[in-house]
Every structure is written in structure tokens, then in C-alpha cells.
Image: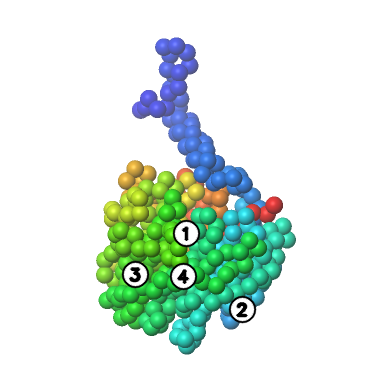
Amino acid sequence: MTSERDRIPQSAGDLRPFPPKLGRWIKRFSLILSVVAVNACTQGPGAPAGGGVYNLLVGTYTGGGSEGIHVYRFDSSAGSVTPVSSAKTENPSYLVPSRDGRIVYAVNELPGDSGPASRRGGISAFGFDAETGTLTFLNRVSAEGNDPCYLSLSPDGRYLVAANYSVASDPGGSFSVFPLAADGRVGAAVQTVHHQGTGPVRGRQDGAHVHSTVFSPDGRYLFVQDLGADRIFEYRYTPDGGRRIFTPADPRDTPVPAGSGPRHLVFSANGRFAYVTNELNASIGVYGYRDGRLAHIETVPMSEPGFKGKVGAAALHLSPDGRFLYASNRGDANEIVIYAVDADSGRLRLVGRQPSLGRTPREFLIDPSGRWLIVGNQDSDGFSVFRRDILTGKLDPDATVPVGKPVDFKLVPVP
């Protein structure tokens, strides 16, 4: 039976039905056009919808076949990856390029599991030539905390904020704030905020463990995910308020269920919703967001029903059009979990699961065209490239690239 949606007007008062197969093809083609249009509108300047050539910067853990930061050329029209250069630095497990792509900032995640708790990690700055893909060391400062694992730039570009996870419960987790010079160098920390708190998971929640620092869409607030304290802490960003650049907001924090371990947070493109990976119980918290406050909507499990192995939720990212959310799940799952996003309510619906083709998937990225997803498999020394269906959100394996302990990925356009 032919529906009204399969008919188009041929003349006034005359509706002639298309054959069913042709009608379905027309609907699918129309959907493709609408999605491409959405992508083109959401990618921002300099991000072509059909593809582009980028520098792919890969952060790693060193000492196992990696020197530090590895740079590749990534052609998003074909999904090809070609090695370009590398720069030596210790455990650059998280990277942030400046907005103009001329500087790359990296954590030096130290001391790690076996180092002395008295040793501080570092924050390093590199000049970056996007045309040649080469990094030049500028300077390094103390992170003023242990095991820095995340970086974010303030919206005005004046400060860099680092999350100090701290494997040891003493001194525990903190975040530190660093001024940035005109030439991109990092200054000594001007503020360090230590958290207090514990959770029920022994060995993982014996003290505070700050895992990420994320600015709100309007740039007025900083949300700090504390895995050890089972809290999402909220701070006002007051750059002209004296020595205290970040001050506690009201409310000061949003609690999560005991034993969850909040890790990473992303906001929806329209700023109405926030999504949080809870590492310890492998779940995603969905929140409404308004004026510095989070309101819990739902919590969605990442594991399959009846799954008995180890889990460890890690990163999460939205597709460029905002229609799908992806999250990496480690432990024995080793997968990317795919959800469809309801634009009105923010709620999630499971679409599928894609094995990461390796062990311990950590960070990943989706390129601006939305056609590729790249994920690092930390414990199998390589990253995997997947083709992404922009209509269904599903992933298909395309290639695997060897590199020692890859854990973070960033793109900088080639001029």
C-alpha cells in the first residue's frame, strides 16, 4: 500500500504514486541531504563537510615503544593515515591544541602507579607548524599535583586548567590553573584547588581523584569530575576577581550514586544537556543543564545485560550533528558503545556496540566530517580507524595503525 509520503504532486489536483522501492529511495536520499546539511552547519569555520586534511596528534604513555607525541597526516576524504613526525616528552597522555593550532599543550602524567607520591607531574608546551607537522619544545612547568590527566583552555584563552588525578590518596586529586604567555609558553600555576572525599570502591576511591575539567557552553562555569569523591564539582570562572580565578558555585557540587566514579563530561551542542561517563560502574549519566546547574535525567548502563567481566568507562563524544553519542568501555568489554540522542529530552537509546579491535580503548575522536572515528587501544599498541555511517551511527573497521600505548587524539587542520 502506498502512503501519502511516497507521493509528489505532478499537477494541480493530481497526485501520482511512485513505486514503493523508488519512494523509499527518495526518502533515504532526502534524509542524507538533511544530515549533510546539519553537518555543514555544525562543524564551524575551516571544517569542510566533505572532508579535509589534518594533522592527527596522538598522545601516548612512553617507555613502551613510544617517544611521546606522534604526528600523522589524516586525509578524511579517504581515511588514510601517514606518519609525519614525533616529539619526545614523558607520558603525554592528554593533549590540547591552541585554537589557532600554533601551540600544543600536553600533560606529563607522572609519577604513575609505581612512582613516589612526592613527585609532581608536568605541563609542557610545544610550538606546532601545522604545514610540516613538526613540534618544537617551548617549556615545561610543574603541574602542582600528581598524575595530571586532562587539560582544558579557558574560553578567553588566558588560562590552561589541568586535572591532577593523583594515584595516591595523599595528596589526593586537585586541579591547577596556569596563565598562558603571548608566545604560548605556560606560566607557573596561579591557583591549585584540592578536593576532599572518598567512595565505597576500595583502592579506587580512597581519596579524591580529579579526572577532567570542562567549561560550560557559556564559559562562565567549570565542571570538575572527581572519580574518587563521587562528585561533579562546580566552580565560577572569575578571571578578574583577584587571586581566586575559580570560586565554588552554588550549589557547590552534584553527587552521583556511590561507587560510580565520574570521569569525563561533554555538553550537547545546544548547551541544554550534559553527558558524563561513570568509570567504575560503566554507565552514562544524562543531565539537563541551565545556568551552572545540572539536573539528573537518567543513568544508562553501558554493559550488556548479564555481563560479568571487568568494565571501565572512559571517554565520550557526540557526533558532529549531535544525533549520536559514543563512549569507550575498557576492562573485558573493549568496545565503543553507540547511542542515539533524543534532541528534545536528551535521553539515550542504545544503537549498538563495536569492538575496538584491541585492548583498553581510551580516548577517541570523530572527525569534523562525521565519517570517521579513531580510537586508541592502549594495551595492544595501536589505534583503530572506523568508517562511520552518518545515518545509522554504526561503525565499520577500516584500518589499524601501530604505535606504543596510544591514549589521546586531536586534529589540527593542514593549511
Mark 3 Cα shell of 10 Å, populated few (<14), some (14-19), many (≥20): many
Residue 335 in the image: state x and y as whole percent.
44, 64
- Cα–Cα gap, marks 4 and 3: 25 Å
Mark 4, secondary structure of its residue: strand
Q: Is residue 368 above or below residue 172?
A: above
Instruction: Please name the residue that numbered disc 1 is placed on.
Output: 239
Q: Measuring 39% from the left and 78% from the top, which residue is drawn there?
A: 172
Q: Which tag, 2 or 1, sits closer to the chain's start?
A: 2
- Cα–Cα gap, marks 3 and 2: 31 Å
Identity of the amino acid at label 3? Gly
Identity of the amino acid at label 4? Gln
Please identify the quadrant where the N terminus is shown: top left
Instruction: Please name the residue that numbered disc 4 is placed on.
Output: 191
The reply to whether dot 3 and dot 1 touch (C-beta < 8 Å) is: no
Mark 3, secondary structure of its residue: loop
Instruction: Please name the residue that numbered disc 2 is placed on.
Output: 65
Identity of the amino acid at label 1? Pro
Mark 2 Cα shell of 10 Å, populated few (<14), some (14-19), many (≥20): few
Q: Which mark is residue 261?
A: 3
Name the one closer to the observer, 376 or 344. Answer: 344
Q: Residue furthest top?
A: 12
Q: Which tag, 4 or 3, sits closer to the chain's start?
A: 4
Mark 4 or mark 2, which is nearer to you?
4
Mark 1 Cα shell of 10 Å, populated few (<14), some (14-19), many (≥20): some
